[in-house]
Amino acid sequence: MNPARPAEPPTRFADAEEINPFKLLLDLHDRALARTAGRGRADAVLAELALSAAVVSWWARWQPSVIHAALRAGADLADVADATGLDASDVVRRWWRWVDVQMRLDIGGRPSVDPAEVRAIERRLGRGLVR
């Protein structure tokens, strides 16, 4: 085990940020290099860059649903902000943007998130939230 990596997965962005991002992406990176074994060095680096950018892009789209799951599970806003490395206002903004889309989705005549669940989270976060 690498002594620089904590025994337990980090729960705060500040802790996770201490881990070399390429170590975090090692499996993905190794697969990319294996697929590009016959290509030149520039192609291998471009593959790494493209995959890393795709992971970042994917995560940016996926993060709000995980923020929602954390809030639904009872995490408080300060803990979610620490886990994401975002300001609390940015967490709320990203969550609202996601919730607004999910509430407009019609799946069998119902939104994709429970409106009562959203209202419960809103109450926990406080009345000062602005949509």
Image (spheres, helix red, strand yellow):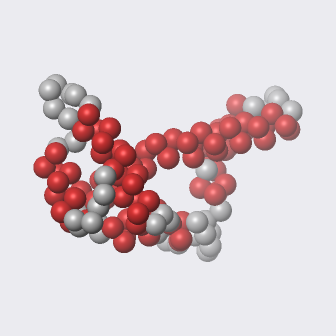
29, above or below 8, in the image: above
> Is residue 31 left or right of 84 when viewed as pictured?
right
Viewer-proximal residue among 111 and 52: 111
> Does any portion of residue 83 appear in the rendered image?
no
> Does any portion of residue 129 appear in the rendered image?
yes
116, above or below 18, in the image: above
> Is residue 72 left or right of 78 when viewed as pictured?
left
110, above or below 76, in the image: above
| Quarter of image, res 19 | bottom right
- Which quadrant does the N terminus fall into? bottom right
Viewer-proximal residue among 49 and 118: 118
Residue 65: x and y in percent read 35, 47
> Is residue 108 left or right of 79 when viewed as pictured?
left
What residue occupies the far top of the structure in this picture? 108
For image coordinates 35% across by 52% down, the residue present is: 95
For image coordinates 13% across by 49% down, the residue present is: 116
For image coordinates 57% across by 46% down, the residue present is: 56
For image coordinates 71% across by 42% down, the residue present is: 49
Viewer-proximal residue among 2 and 118: 118
Residue 29: x and y in percent read 66, 44
Residue 85: x and y in percent read 50, 65
What residue occupies the far bottom of the structure in this picture? 3
